[in-house]
Image (tube, coloured by chain):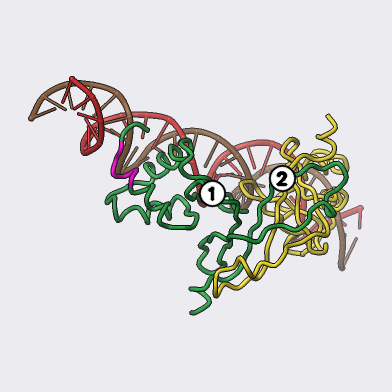
Chain colours: A yellow, B green, C red, D brown
Amino acid sequence: MQRDTSQRRAIRRALEDAGRPLGALEVLEASKDHAPGLGIATVYRNIKALLKAKEISEVQLPGEPPRYEAAGKDHHHHFRCERCEKVFELGGACLPDLKGALPRGFKVTSHEVLVHGICAACAKK
Amino acid sequence: MQRDTSQRRAIRRALEDAGRPLGALEVLEASKDHAPGLGIATVYRNIKALLKAKEISEVQLPGEPPRYEAAGKDHHHHFRCERCEKVFELGGACLPDLKGALPRGFKVTSHEVLVHGICAACAKK
DNA sequence: TTGATAATGATAACACAATATCATTTGACC
DNA sequence: GGTCAAATGATATTGTGTTATCATTATCAA
């Protein structure tokens, strides 16, 4: 990643502006405004480069290809709308005491939470 | 699913006995004791049939192919060992109040939690 | 402005999990 | 025990997401 191309700028900006994790195809769509003719290969290439540069981070959800979001956020979890399938960021509330549920000898290093439901936009329809 | 074959019995039993979610290949390995020569196609076929019969249920984890566990358990979550990559069942402790973290208008239907860490067996080594 | 080369877009190729195919085996009813 | 379709095992095929290839374009230092 040594040159500053319009495609990379568009992809970086799309992920920053989205405020929620985007999949590769969502990145492609969201970036096309500022980078007409953008190809999917370039999206994957730049996602990889931005990951390595720690500018974005990967969000893995059960049963789906990975999504990507701007890096450097505080600990948070995600909400997936069952209707539009978009994923949103949830701030704040975290896990309760886990120790009671842990088998003896198990050591925790991290955790993740995924909440399923209907987002505000879809609930209105 | 109309005939009671030794392969199907072995697969069903492997999943019941494991006490934790198994992936397709884990099912194959665990079933071979009681079904020598078992093939992976048969594992997939029977997983599908047992799912339809609601005898087992699917456990989706981020970034991995699905695993399967005996159906009918109480609400619970999972623990994935980073070292041996086995997944274990966690009972008990659940989520705190989510409402504070939810954007206005969002409706929750379910949630899932995945805890990462080192299992007791791996911690000993 | 120019030259070297990193980056791009189109698309072929790949990797992996899962399913389809098909000859053979086997469970269940008579 | 004999019959016959369901089930199996081996493997070819598919499907989806991602990466490789390569001719062309565009960035940037000189």
Identify the residue shown where x is 81% and y is 34%. A122
Instruction: Please state the extent of the stretch shown in magenta in the rendering.
Output: B4-9
The residue under label 1 is which amino acid type?
Answer: Pro
Q: x, y percentage for residue B31?
A: 35, 52
State the residue position of label 1: B66
Q: Nearer the viewer, residue D25 or B91?
A: B91
Query: With respect to residue B49, does B13 lie above or below?
Result: below
Rendering quarter of residue A84: top right
Residue A76 numbered mark, or none: none
Residue at the image point whose x is 60% and y is 51% from the top:
B75
Q: Which of the two residues, B12 or A75, is positioned nearer the viewer here? A: B12
- Residue placed at 51% from the left, 51% from the top? B67
- Drawn side of residue A89 relative to residue B67, left or right: right
The chain identifier of the residue carrying mark 1 reads B
CA neighbours of label 1 inside 10 A, class few (<14), some (14 to 19), many (20+) = some
Q: Disc 2 marks which residue?
A: A116
Give the residue type that dot 2 points to: His
